[in-house]
Amino acid sequence: MASITEMDILRGPVEPINFGDELSDEINDLLQQGVAAYRHDRKRADEFFRQAMAAAPEVLPVYLCLYKIHTYQGNLDHALEAAETGLEVAARQAGWDPDWRKWPVLAVNPDGAARFALYTLKALAFISLRRDEREKALEILAVLKILDPSGFVGWPVIAALAEGAA
């Protein structure tokens, strides 16, 4: 099998993505293979990511990969499922309530599971917009405005999209 760092004939070199130091080599390899496969075989990419999820369901980048590829492809039901599951895992790891409406306001920009949770909540707002669930997206964005007033995770971009969709 070709390495993620080998030349993709049609699109040029593929650089490895840094998913974080906490990943085992096995899970990192599966994610890298999924990223590489996505360029030419989206079904195979999904299989790599799901294999990683089955092997390490507490590893947050797996959910990111799944909800991103499915959002890009317009498979919004799959994207929603991956994002919601990733959100549950991240909230648990951050020590937060499973209901994002009850999350604490933080004094500093978060990292780790807390950052992933906020970032994934932003993704849920975007997925909701794409699913024509504008009211749900607006509810999420209103909570993000309170939880992340500086826009650290990039929710203002999604808010602008929601405003344009009005």
Image (spheres, rainbow, N blue to C red):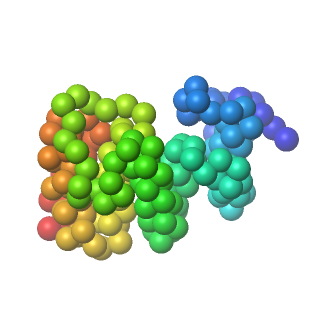
Give x and y (percent) for residue 33.
71, 43
Residue ranking furthest to the right: 1
Residue 8 in view of the camera: no
Q: Is residue 11 left or right of residue 114?
A: right
Q: Is residue 108 left or right of residue 27?
A: left
**Residue under the point 32% across and 66% down:** 128
**Residue under the point 39% across and 49% down:** 91
Residue nearest the observer in this picture, 156 or 150? 150
In which quadrant will I find the N terminus? top right
Residue 62 in view of the camera: yes
Give x and y (percent) for residue 9.
73, 38
Give x and y (percent) for residue 84.
43, 61
Residue nearest the observer in this picture, 165 or 91? 91
**Residue under the point 81% across and 38% down:** 2
Marker count (numbered): 0
**Residue under the point 19% across and 63% down:** 139
In which quadrant will I find the C terminus? bottom left
Residue nearest the observer in this picture, 138 or 105? 105
Residue 145, compared with residue 140, is above or below; it is above
Residue 10, compared with residue 139, is above or below; it is above
Give x and y (percent) for residue 51.
71, 54
Question: Residue 102: which quarter of the image?
Answer: bottom left
